[in-house]
Amino acid sequence: MKINRALTATVFLCLSCGCAGVQYTEKIHEVDLTQSEKNKISVRVLAKAESWRNSGVFVKKDHKYNITAKGRWRVGGLCGWTGPDGTGCYTPLCWDSSMFRFIEGWSHCTLLGKIGKDGKPFAIGDDYELVAREDGVLYLHINDNGSCGDNEGMVTVTTALPETEIARSETGGAPPDVISKKAAREQGRATGVVKSTGRNWAVIIGISRYRHTGPNGLETLIFADDDAKSFARVLRNLGWSESHIKLLINEEATQRNVMIALESWLTKADAEDRIVLFWSGHGFPDPEDPEKVYFACFDTDINVPATGYRMDRVRQALEERKCRNVVLFADTCHAGKLITRGSRGLSIIPQIDRMRREGNAPKGWIFMVGADTDRQAIEHSSWSNGAFTHCLLKGLYGAADGYESVGVKDGILTMGELRAYLNSVMPEETQRVLGVAKRPVITTSTGDPNIWKLHLQER
């Protein structure tokens, strides 16, 4: 994680023993914002602090709190400076590892919180809406439990009551999550939000390592497997059942296992159910027919295209389920160099174009693909994900809710709100990091505008 193999054994021993960092010494008197004249409180969280930081806020069960954080920090001199969302933490001399962190699956530089000294840590990042499930003091910490005092920087964290909570504290009333659910039902009836009466199913595939690599094979990717893990975590956060998520990572994502997932496991889905497919990794066209495009599985040999999984076969497998709605997310392209995941064309774009041109794309499908006009999907260490997935995750975690007034900020994120967010934020983000704007491809197979009212929240 924070250290290079070439560093001395003394430093490694120091880390292994969890050497003490800075201790907070000032006394903080917690405030219940629902009973106080104050609507928000800010504290500074030091990266090198060993102890958890008292936020100064006593949160109450079933109340909502907006937590925002700004600043820069890093977990050691070999790691990158990041914000509280933790993106950009790792460098060639500072790699990701499961050691020395409180929560697996999040960068060591991510801001965490917990309720009570013995509470279970959760990720906050730079913007988070907390619905407290118990009473207690909110504590804050960087996602690093082996700093040895070598961390640097700090972030300022502000915990505030949203307007709905301020009104509630003044007038009393039902818990805000109850209010929002009731409002959401009314909102759905009024606006025609697309709601399936069935269940949710997801096949999520992320491949960074391939069996056939080298000059005539597939290049190893950095973040594709993390893309898939992060997306699965988002669905769980939205209430999806673990048993309805099929996650295939690296060696698990063989052509056979992918075929079983799409053509056998998904037979459990009914017509009223909703299917989500997420694929992050390489894709490639058939050199004899560029419109025949393939997802690269772990055991794919690109010199033998049939060892991949054809995009039209994916469509056929999903179409056979006769589900009302299918959403396909892809951060994949042909074998890449440097920050790109491809220089000869994003694999699934020609197939999407062909499906639309021939009019054989099933109605009720949405495609959201990480590519722009040059058809290159990209990844960069600043994001710890592909560019498209990085923006997608932030949107699904709530940043897209009510974006640019496309919809109401009501806790129900529609595909229309997500579309507006990705079309705006991804070019801005890639321009900031890469110096050139990259745009996603987002389209649907139906002309019905209500398709964009579809959402991914579990009922």
Image (spheres, grey):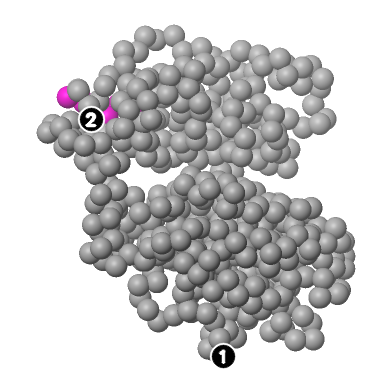
Count the labels in the image: 2
Q: Sequence order check: which comes first, mark 1 or mark 2?
A: 2
Q: Residue 276 versus residue 54: which sits nearer the camera?
A: 276
Q: Which residue lies furthest to the bottom in this view?
A: 358
Q: Is 39 within the magenta? A: yes
Percent position of residue 440, x then y: 52, 68
Which element type, helix, strand or loop, lies under badge 1? helix
Could you tell me which residue is drawn at 79 percent across and 63 percent down?
A: 256
Q: What stretch is highlighted in magenta?
A: 37-43
Percent position of residue 430, x then y: 53, 59
Residue pointed to by mark 2: 39
Mark 1: give few (<14), some (14-19) or many (20+) Cα within 10 Å: few
Percent position of residue 344, x then y: 71, 75
Which image quarter: residue 195? Answer: bottom left
Could you tell me which residue is drawn at 31 percent across and 16 percent down?
A: 30
On the rendered structure, is 242 left or right of 284? left
Is residue 372 in view?
no
Q: Is 129 within the magenta? A: no
The answer to whether 294 is drawn above or below residue 220 in the figure is: below
Which element type, helix, strand or loop, lies under badge 2? loop
Percent position of residue 14, x then y: 72, 16
The amino acid type, in three-letter code, at marker 2 is Asn
Kindly identify which numbered label has been placed on residue 358: 1
On the rendered structure, is 87 left or right of 309? left
Could you tell me which residue is drawn at 47 percent across and 47 percent down?
A: 239
The answer to whether 11 is drawn above or below residue 297 in the figure is: above
